[in-house]
Image (cartoon, rainbow, N blue to C red):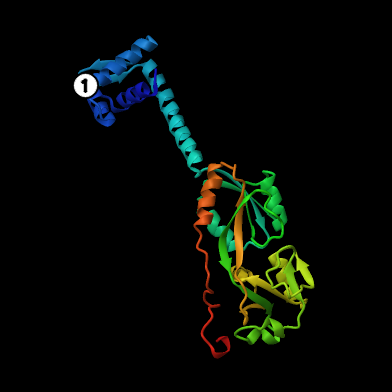
Amino acid sequence: MDVRDLECFLAVAEEGTISRAAERLHMTQPPLTVRLRTLERELGVELLVRHGRGVTVTAAGRLLAEHARRLLADLSATTETVRAVGLGTHGKLALAVGHSIAPRLLARLLRSLGSDVDFALVEVSDAEVLDRVHHREAHAGLLHRTSSRRANGLEVAVISRAPLVVVLPESHPAASAERVDLTQLTDDRVALSDTDFAPSTVAPRHRADSVPHALALVESGAGVALLTTDHVPQVWPGLVARPLRQHTTTTESAVCWRPDEHSPVMRRFLRAALSTPEPDVLGHPFARHPAPEDS
């Protein structure tokens, strides 16, 4: 008894005639009749009673139809699940996310995978991102590309570029300026623990383990913070983000993974991450407009 035999029998049992079942199955009546008789011989019982108006299902046939319907539904569901796992549209993805990664960038990447993927996200330092991926505690990691730690044989690729802005309290004297000159700031600076976006000549006094903690320090009056434009949506009322007057290199966010990681979900995530646009210019409202002082 094979799957096709069950499909044929169930079609006849549900349609009530061999002719309608044949149409439903896109086959002719003779081979369908042969399959029905072969199935009856194999089971050693009569499944259908033939008469002029069609067929009547026997008690044994009704039991077989009930089980066949359930078996075929399970087989269809299993087929779809196996296919989804193989294509990476269903499964699990463990990500180690550096605290410098902007939530909106992460959300954009996760959205591309759809709702049938189970996520396990952990926010750690950039150094720990590399460790977790290297030790197979995460399928992939997201981090600031200038992390001082070596990648330990991992693949690393840029997925996003963003320019810097300075975040300061609304009451700060420079808050009303269109652009802020870093050299004119006398405030102490707040930096993320192992991810310093600022030029190396500007030494931070305070360090924070996350962007919200850095913003809290700024609001408390401890200093100002240099973050990327990707973090601007996290800036809450009472704080402002201003573009910088001087040119600074754009900061790069990257994805890292093990070359021997073959998880279909991870590979699909990687394709989405590597297809992310990499903005090389400032976007509104941080676009640099031609001005005499900028020439």
| Residue 46 visible in the shown view | no
In the picture provided, is 9 more to the left or to the right than 294? Answer: left
Relative image position of residue 9 (x, y in whole percent)? 33, 22
Quadrant occupied by the N terminus: top left
Q: Residue at x 41, y 27 (%)?
A: 69
Quadrant occupied by the C terminus: bottom right
Question: Foreground residue, 269 or 278?
Answer: 278
Q: Which residue is mark 1?
A: 53
Judge whether 249 appears above or below 187 on screen: above
Judge whether 38 appears above or below 140 on screen: above
Q: How many marks?
A: 1
Q: Quadrant of residue 109?
A: bottom right
Q: Residue at x 28, y 29 (%)?
A: 25
In the picture provided, is 260 more to the left or to the right than 57? Answer: right
Q: Residue at x 55, y 90 (%)?
A: 292
Relative image position of residue 189 (x, y in whole percent)? 75, 75
Q: Amino acid at mark 1?
A: Arg
Question: Foreground residue, 116 or 225?
Answer: 225
Relative image position of residue 282 (x, y in whole percent)? 54, 74
Judge whether 119 appears above or below 165 on screen: above
Q: Residue at x 76, y 83 (%)?
A: 186
